Image (spheres, rainbow, N blue to C red):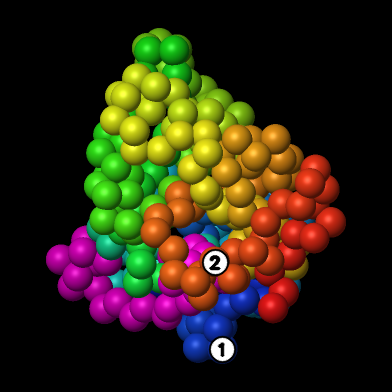
Amino acid sequence: MLFVVGLGLGDEKDITLRGLEAVKRCQKVYIEAYTSLLSFGLSSDGLSTLEKLYGKSITLADREIVEEKADGILSEARESDVAFLVVGDPFGATTHSDLVVRAKKMGVEVKVVHNASVMNAIGVCGLQLYRYGETISIPFFTETWRPDSFYEKIKQNRLLGLHTLCLLDIRVKEPSLESLCRGRKQYEPPRYMTINTAIEQLLEVEQTQGGSAYNEDTDCVGFARLGSEDQLIVAGTMRRLQTIDFGTPLHCLVIVGKTHPVEEEMLDFYKLRGESLERIDDGTI
């Protein structure tokens, strides 16, 4: 059997009791290591923390393993219990849906254990979850590749008065273009997009498109390390958020749509006062 287990957003303690029971019964445990990460990252120290609590050896599953060699994991799950750990909720990324589809096609039984994800944890800022439009992803721009397909989605959300969750790019164990051209994979250092970079790219796209979907004075909410003890949430205009050092990853951004008075009251707790972060809440309500 394949257990697909959500780990939540913070640290090793965020796993549910049902998830922990599933992990403890498994003969092999993998952790997906490229669509997200826990607050302590995926260092050897971080993994040993997980292993100590779960009582199991854990194998890192990077993009290459999950997308190209998943049949090996699923073959193991045919013969024994295998856990596939996912930061957040198992279905927060389409990759995990694909894994479940492949498992079912191979006749492997699948059980899913859900957990908190960024998709619902953003509710902490006070913006109501049912007032969000389509979620978008912002990839890192390169000199030759500056995609802007997300722009029309933001524009449509804004026309409807809906908020937009922007998921920011994570590049872990990505082969460099030069190495691919040479036919020999060499991997780039890990990169995690910051809120500052995301806003810079958003404003560049607006300038290019000229559709007035948003501007420097558009209200947004920046989230860093959402769900962890040191999470940071700041509400303000794009211009103001660009001046803030949000610290270590992971970051995400919400572009605010039309707000209800109750939403505005909650957002006020996270607004920057002057040039100081003194009054910014860490998410403790």
Residue 69's tag is: none
What is the quadrant of residue 15 in the picture? bottom right
Tell me the quadrant of the picture where the C terminus can be found: bottom right
Question: What type is the residue that disc 1 sits on?
Answer: Leu
What residue is shown at x 45% (from left), y 19% (from top)? 142
- Real-space CA distance between mark 1 and mark 2, rounded to the nearest whole angstrom: 36 Å
Residue 281 vertical position relative to residue 62 in the rendered view, above or below: below
| Residue where numbered disc 1 is placed | 17
Q: How far from the left and from the top, in percent, is residue 173?
A: 52, 36
Residue 109 vertical position relative to residue 189 in the rendered view, above or below: below
Tell me the quadrant of the picture where the N terminus can be found: bottom left
Taking the image as shown, residue 105 lies to the left or right of residue 215, namely: left
Which residue is most to the front? 261
Q: How far from the left and from the top, in percent, is residue 172?
A: 53, 39
| Residue where numbered disc 2 is placed | 264
* Residue 190 counted in the magenta span: no
